Image (cartoon, helix red, strand yellow):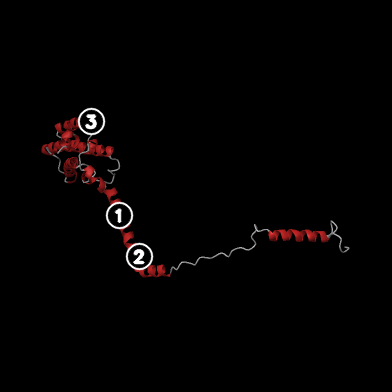
Amino acid sequence: MTPGKPPVEGTSASYDAAFAEAHRRLIEDDSIQFQLQPVEVPDRPDLSGLFDFLQAAGPVVKVLFWVALIAIAAFLIYLIALRITGASWPWRRGASSAPDESWRPAEAPARQLLAEADGLAADGRFSEAAHLLLFRSIEDIDGRRPDLVRPALTSRDIAGLSGIPARPRGAFARIAMAVERSLFARRPLVEGDWRDCRAAYEEFAFADGWRG
């Protein structure tokens, strides 16, 4: 290239000059930041005090853990025992202690049952009459609380269920005891036994027996 003449377009000198001019303009442009500020890394928190505390409290934490575990296991066993025995939940006992009319058998079927049992008693079949009252009473309870009566429960077990209101439960227990005597002691019921069972069923089935 001849000195003093501008670079010829298309030559390497023209590309170099254009690049130099573009670079100069880039450097002089204040809107472009070429130096980045250093990033300050925060200091890591000192956890040595926490570790020392946890290490010192280790035995206490271990004792609390086992106490909590035992308490949970005992509570689960308690719930299972309530479920097996049919007892009502403690927070529902206040409500169950009051008479619950929904437990009573319908009056018409109950009176029909008494008529059938009276027919057996009229023939001197007092034990069979009491059995009939007992079995139908169990059916009545199971119909209203199918979760309460289980096949493994005896009539005496059912008589002890706290889920049944107190007065009907006591009346049912009188029938159950008389029937058990006739079955296990092999002592047939007599008329006096039957009359007591009949009175107990009336107390179990009809409204007057649920009051007071």
Of residues 26 and 196, the one drawn nearer to the viewer in this rendering = 26
Q: Which mark is residue 109?
A: 3
35 is higher (above) or lower (below) than 110:
below
- Callout 3, which amino acid? Pro
Q: Which residue is mark 2?
A: 61
As drawn, the residue found furthest toward the right would be 2
Could you tell me residue 86's position as x and y percent?
A: 26, 46
Nearer the observer, 87 or 119: 87
Q: Is residue 102 left or right of residue 45?
A: left
Q: Residues within 10 Å of mark 3 (few under 14, many from 20)?
A: few
Q: Residue sitting at 36 percent across and 70 percent down?
A: 56
| Image vertical order of residue 130 relative to residue 152, above or below | above
Q: Amino acid at mark 2?
A: Val
Q: Is residue 88 visible?
A: no
Quarter of the image with the C terminus is: top left
- Front in this rendered view, residue 187 or 80: 80
Residue 180 position by quadrant: top left
Residue holding disc 1: 75
Mark 2 neighbour density, 10 Å: few (under 14) some (14–19) many (20 or more): few
* Residue 141 locus on image (x, y percent): 25, 39
